[in-house]
Image (cartoon, helix red, strand yellow):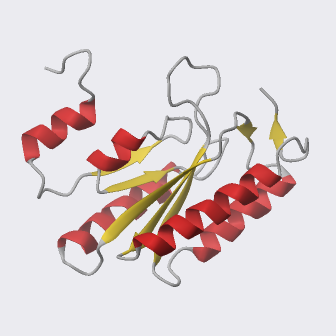
Amino acid sequence: MTTSKETFLERVRALVGPKCVIGVELDPHCHLTVKRVKLADIIILYKEYPHTDQVERAEELPDLVLKMIRGQVKPVMSLYDCRQLAWYRTDMPLMRDFVDRIKATEGKDSVLSISIGHCFPLSDVPEVGSRVLVIMDKDKAKGDTLATEVGMELVSMRGQRSWVDKC
């Protein structure tokens, strides 16, 4: 049983140890915390809001986990904090284009996955806010750069009504 200060991922990591691969699929309204990124090996978020792609992401996750187990890839995760709160509707024109471009980037130049953590803007947690998570094959520096670039692009679209519903 977990304690109030121990998260589910902490408990799983404690049970399976550092060598076991932990892959997690999450709703984009989760809070992508530094702690979660450190505890998991692979985190995949739904790309769509409204959520229409759970099955695609559920297929993507075990594919990456199995590639990691087989030694075909060595995922490294990079997290960028956009420092903003918003509802990112992917059925709105600007966000639709943004997500489509992210999807087109995956699988090229060592990019394994890109997720946009919308967060739940009305929550009361210390690490509330939008974040970009990039998973690269081996290249952490390139992942950090790409996460920053994607995050800065997301921030640059702030306040455009055709893209988000403001909180």
Out of 129 and 48, give the one closest to the viewer. 129
How many marks are shown on the rendered structure?
0
Q: Is residue 164 left or right of residue 110?
A: right
Q: Is residue 123 above or below residue 38?
A: above
Q: Is residue 155 above or below residue 119?
A: below
> In the displayed image of the protein, which residue is found farthest to the right?
161
| Residue 11 image position (x, y, % from top left) | 17, 33
Name the residue at 35% across, 76% down: 138
| Residue 9 image position (x, y, % from top left) | 26, 37
Quarter-of-image position of residue 10: top left
Task: For the N terminus, give its image quadrant.
Answer: top left
Q: Is residue 153 left or right of residue 122?
A: right
Name the residue at 29% across, 56% down: 41
Task: For the C terminus, give its image quadrant.
Answer: top right
Out of 161 and 138, give the one closest to the viewer. 138
Name the residue at 23% across, 24% down: 6
| Residue 105 image position (x, y, % from top left) | 60, 75
Name the residue at 50% across, 24% down: 126
| Residue 43 image position (x, y, % from top left) | 39, 52
